[in-house]
Image: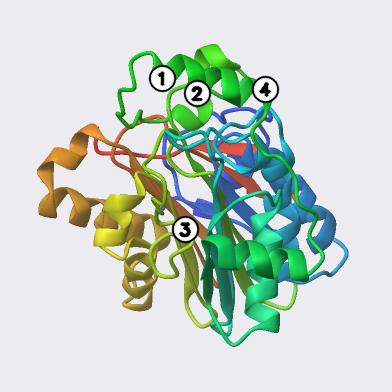
């Protein structure tokens, strides 16, 4: 039998972009470690690593990491530069969860650049899990978060261009296809999901997004829904999702991945089974994109998606800028 640890060590010796080797090969990382969705997860991981490498907690790490794409003006799928809804409003969703099941989330939040940090305040300073809309904004302002205009000139230009046809159709892998390409690259949305395991063996996860571009006002996807976009169980592992959130919500996707790991499935098999559940229940979903990423308490990593093009970033003491292609059905 091949030594999986030896395989991933060899793979991680490659360049910082897409690594050579068998596509979708499962990885085993040493703690502390952090993983995240998409190419822009590399920079987010490095911010999280700055916390983990100093003995910091997984919870602090995922918050710090998620704030990086939230502040990235080249990222039109997360945070302050996200594309708006069809009425021109930028609304943000986020969730955070620790190993003990403590969690917080916000949805439909306007005018606040870092929803992940507001979500953590919900977790730590309220008896609730989820705050939405005007109430979430009121809470954020009361907590001292500055009110800002989030619709950037570039996003405004993309929205006005979209209004010429006003056609709404989710585009697979737009997370990377539109990254840094300006208004001319406008297609759709998405998410960064992060999972971390700290030196004490504690897990945490975070998920943050500006949601689907050109969505109906008030639409909320899976990212702030505990069990859909994010789920953490300190005795088993953690999972997060990306893609068209409606399909993830219908199948409580991240919870399903963690439950499959509880039953003994390694992370990659659990992610594959969760994607298959979506396709079995709704065969037309094959034209969309949904991906899952998982990390168990042993540092084993796995991912799977409907369509090729999903990538995920890995970071531990051996390498902080690794990026792997996720396996897929199509």
Q: Position of residue 101 (x, y in %)?
A: 53, 82
Does label 4 or label 2 sit earlier along the sequence? 4
Does label 1 or label 4 sit earlier along the sequence? 4
Marks 1 and 2: CB-CB under 8 Å? yes
The CA distance from mark 4 to mark 2 is 10 Å
Q: Where is mark 4, residue-wise? A: 153
Dividing the picture into quarters, in which one does residue 58 lie? bottom right
The CA distance from mark 3 to mark 1 is 32 Å
The CA distance from mark 1 to mark 2 is 6 Å
Q: Where is mark 3, residue-wise? A: 240
Residue 319 showing in the rendered view: no
Q: Position of residue 204 (x, y in %)?
A: 61, 70
Label 3 element class: strand
Which residue is located at x 11 percent, y 43 percent? 283
Dividing the picture into quarters, in which one does residue 151 lie? top right
Residue 159 is labelled as: 2
Q: Quadrant of the C terminus?
A: top left
The CA distance from mark 4 to mark 3 is 31 Å
Does label 2 or label 3 sit earlier along the sequence? 2
The CA distance from mark 1 to mark 4 is 15 Å
Q: Is residue 142 left or right of residue 256?
A: right
Residue 163 is labelled as: 1
Dividing the picture into quarters, in which one does residue 145 lie? bottom right
Label 2 element class: helix
């Amino acid at each position: 039998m091949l030594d999986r640890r030896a395989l991933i060590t060899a793979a991680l010796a490659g360049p910082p972009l897409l690594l050579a080797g068998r596509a979708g090969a499962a990885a085993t990382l040493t703690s502390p470690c952090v993983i995240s969705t998409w190419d822009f997860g590399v920079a987010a991981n490095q911010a999280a690593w700055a916390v983990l490498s100093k003995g910091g907690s997984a919870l602090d790490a995922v918050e710090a990491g998620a704030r990086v794409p939230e502040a990235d003006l080249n990222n039109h799928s997360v945070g302050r530069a996200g594309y708006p809804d069809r009425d021109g409003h930028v609304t943000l969703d986020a969730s955070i969860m620790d190993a003990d099941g403590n969690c917080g989330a916000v949805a439909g939040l306007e005018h606040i650049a870092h929803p992940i940090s507001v979500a953590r305040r919900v977790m730590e300073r309220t008896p609730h899990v989820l705050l939405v809309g005007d109430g979430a904004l009121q809470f954020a302002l009361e907590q001292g978060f500055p009110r800002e205009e989030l619709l950037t000139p570039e996003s405004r230009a993309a929205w006005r261009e979209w209004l010429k046809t006003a056609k709404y159709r989710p585009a697979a892998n737009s997370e990377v296809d539109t990254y840094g390409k300006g208004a001319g690259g406008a297609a759709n949305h998405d998410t960064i999901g992060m999972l971390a395991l700290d030196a004490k063996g504690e897990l945490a996860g975070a998920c943050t997004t500006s949601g689907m571009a050109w969505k109906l006002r008030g639409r909320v996807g899976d990212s702030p829904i505990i069990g859909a976009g994010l789920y953490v169980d300190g005795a088993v592992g953690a999972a997060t999702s990306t893609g068209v959130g409606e399909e993830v919500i219908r199948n409580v996707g991240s919870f399903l991945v963690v439950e499959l790991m509880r039953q003994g499935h390694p992370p990659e098999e659990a992610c594959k089974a969760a994607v298959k559940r979506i396709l079995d229940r709704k065969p037309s979903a094959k034209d969309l994109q949904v991906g899952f990423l998982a990390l168990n308490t042993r540092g084993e990593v796995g991912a799977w998606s409907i369509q090729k093009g999903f990538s995920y970033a890995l970071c531990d003491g051996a390498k902080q800028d690794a990026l792997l292609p996720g396996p897929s059905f199509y």
